Amino acid sequence: MNKKNILLIVFVMLLASSVFVIASTGESYINIEKGWNLIYGFVPGSLEGQALDFSHIKAIYAYIPEDDEYLRIHPNPDNTKIDLVGDKYLESSIMWAYSDISQRTEYWFEQPLPISETSLYPGWNLVRVTPDMFYEKDGQEFFSWDSVKGNCNIEKVYAWNPEIQNWMLISPAEESFDFNDFFMMGMAVKVEEGCNLGKSEIGAPPTIPN
């Protein structure tokens, strides 16, 4: 058996033995800061072949809103709870990732669901900021939570600033192109009751006057 076939078999075995195998992938640049970071779909395997070596990631946790608790993904993953929640759910969630260095890198992630298929639980949720949540205005890409609130009554929004390792209060009505800084990351969104996000629908044009 030649070396190419042996390497292929080893690669497939490594994928099969991994806790997470990302199937429908995308790739994006992000700035990972030293300390805690909120990153969409960041799981073991996300940095495969990328600039930042996974050894610098010291911890990964998922927040499960329906249980209001953290689930440890790395190190020493809580496999019993991971099996109950499901890899697919976690791959489409916001993760807390702790890095011991700051570095800009690409990473692999599971393609996010459309904004219209994003459900929130009563209380706090960690919600990703992805391309379909932005809209064009004056030649720039803008974003506001009010523009994607769907049928949700958004009470509070906080953005995590990894550079200063602290929360920032965000008004749901705030419209800004600076939210590009949070692209593929997440924010903490508090809602009154279970609901679905979605872009605001444009109604019919005004009626012709009598």
Image: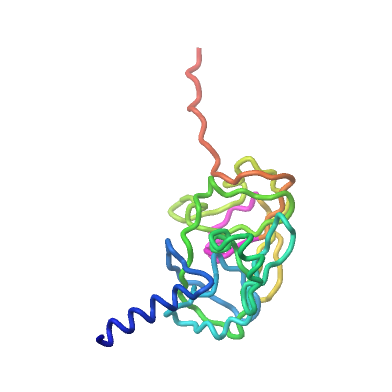
Visible in this render: residue 162?
no
- In this rendered view, identify the residue nearer to me: 202 or 99: 99
Q: Quadrant of residue 196?
A: top right
- Between residue 160 and residue 69, name the one nearer to us: 69
* Residue 63 is inside the magenta segment: no
Residue 133 image offset from top left, x and y in percent? 52, 52
- Residues 191 and 3: in front is 3
Quarter where residue 81 is shown = bottom right
Residue located at (71% from left, 71% from top): 166
Residues in magenta? 173-187
Q: Is residue 182 magenta?
A: yes
Looking at the image, the residue that sits furthest to the bottom is 3
Q: Position of residue 198 (x, y in %)?
A: 56, 44
Relative placement, left or right, of 148 versus 6 is right
| Residue at the front extreme, as displayed | 1
Residue at 64 percent of width and 66 percent of height: 62
Percent x, y for residue 124?
72, 56
The residue located at (45%, 73%) in the rendering is 16
> Looking at the figure, which quarter contains the N terminus?
bottom left
